[in-house]
Image (tube, rainbow, N blue to C red):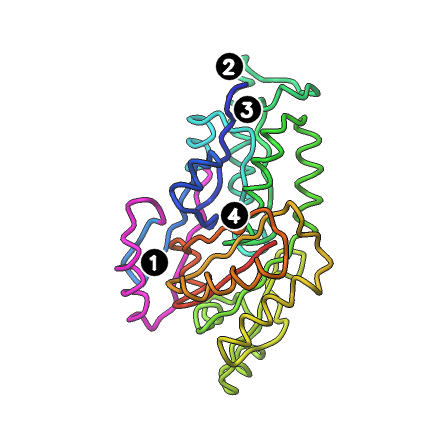
């Protein structure tokens, strides 16, 4: 069986080892601090970028990967599936769709168009764009599930049905030390943001199930942060046996490890994956932010 790579935008946080294991090829976001532009790829000096970000008091801009970037990735890899950050948070999903349409048009004009496949072994013929309805750890979790389904050699139709079902049941939560960048970039309701700032509390945020960010509660201490994130699992109704949980963090490995140990002691996930946030995720998670998805 031919190995089928997955194309994903760079908000899909991964270590190099995990990226190789899942066969993920990333297409980078762009970030800018005023006139200084950064590309969220392997060449990004992440510590220096975070240092510059900490000193920057203005709005931090971000640019979705262009249709051309996706087009080149699709053409080079022969990927059948592309995974994106929530379409409610970025134009990335739209750009990926456009790239897939352009490539399909080029294939048709060259006489290489491929009819829809119904064979279980016949993945890789068309490009399917999957909206994770999440970001960071959530997008990473979807990539893990997508690789499992591809390797199981299900038909494209079954893969799409099962991954959509998985995404709509998935839970993503995060606790941030600093919500300034979310506020500046319009990712969080300003009233909720102002209240959390005035009360000196850390908001417990998460996906609303439709790809947008919602306030679920608040914490004040490290202990409360761990307890509240762990408790979301019990309240979610999600099965844990044989499943994966992903934790991403922005320079907070001790909290990530402590959180993972608590979860291992209470639940039977098949694997808990810990990854550092990449460039774009670091913009929003900011220093010491932590994200979980299951």
At a point 52% along the width and 81% down the height, the residue shown is: 220
| Separation of marks 1 and 2 at Cα, in angstroms | 38 Å
First reached walking from the N terminus: tag 3 or tag 4: 3
Q: Where is mark 2, residue-wise?
A: 110
Toward which corner of the image does residue 65 lie, by quadrant?
A: top left
* Residue 20 position within the rendered picture, expressed as x and y whole percent measured from the top left: 42, 36
First reached walking from the N terminus: tag 4 or tag 2: 2
Which residue is nearer to you in this view: 159 or 74?
159
Which residue is nearer to you in this view: 41 or 113?
41
Which residue is nearer to you in this view: 206 or 195?
206
* Residue 226 position within the rendered picture, expressed as x and y whole percent measured from the top left: 54, 70
* Residue 71 position within the rendered picture, expressed as x and y whole percent measured from the top left: 46, 32
Is 85 contained in the magenta span? no
Q: Where is mark 3, residue-wise?
A: 105
Badge nearest the viewer, 1 or 3: 1
Q: How many numbered discs, if any?
A: 4
| The magenta segment | 40-68
At a point 54% along the width and 32% down the height, the residue shown is: 100
What number is the disc on residue 140? Answer: 4
Secondary-structure class at tag 3: helix
């Amino acid at each position: 069986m031919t190995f089928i790579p997955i194309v994903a935008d760079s908000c899909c946080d991964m270590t190099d080892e995990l990226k190789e294991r899942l066969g993920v090829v990333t297409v980078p976001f762009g970030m800018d601090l005023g006139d200084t532009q950064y590309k969220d790829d392997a060449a990004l000096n992440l510590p220096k970028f975070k240092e510059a970000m900490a000193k920057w008091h203005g709005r931090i801009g971000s640019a979705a990967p262009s249709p051309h970037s996706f087009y080149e990735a699709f053409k080079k890899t022969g990927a059948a599936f592309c995974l994106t950050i929530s379409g409610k948070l970025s134009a990335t999903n739209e750009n990926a769709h456009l790239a897939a349409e352009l490539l399909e048009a080029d294939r048709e004009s060259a006489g290489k168009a491929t009819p829809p496949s119904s064979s279980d072994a016949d993945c890789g013929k068309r490009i399917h764009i999957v909206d994770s309805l999440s970001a960071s750890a959530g997008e990473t979790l979807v990539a893990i599930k997508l690789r499992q389904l591809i390797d199981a050699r299900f038909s494209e139709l079954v893969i799409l049905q099962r991954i959509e079902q998985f995404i709509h049941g998935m839970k993503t939560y995060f606790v941030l030390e600093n919500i300034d960048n979310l506020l500046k970039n319009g990712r969080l309701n300003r009233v909720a943001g102002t209240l959390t700032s005035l009360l000196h509390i850390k908001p417990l945020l998460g996906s609303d199930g439709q790809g947008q960010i919602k306030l679920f509660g608040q914490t004040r201490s490290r202990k409360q942060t761990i307890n509240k994130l762990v408790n979301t699992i019990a309240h979610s109704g999600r099965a844990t046996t044989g499943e994966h949980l992903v934790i991403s963090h922005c320079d907070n490995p001790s909290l990530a490890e402590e959180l993972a140990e608590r979860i291992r002691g209470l639940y039977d996930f098949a694997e808990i994956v810990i990854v550092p946030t990449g460039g774009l995720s670091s913009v929003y998670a900011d220093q010491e932010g932590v994200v979980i998805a299951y």
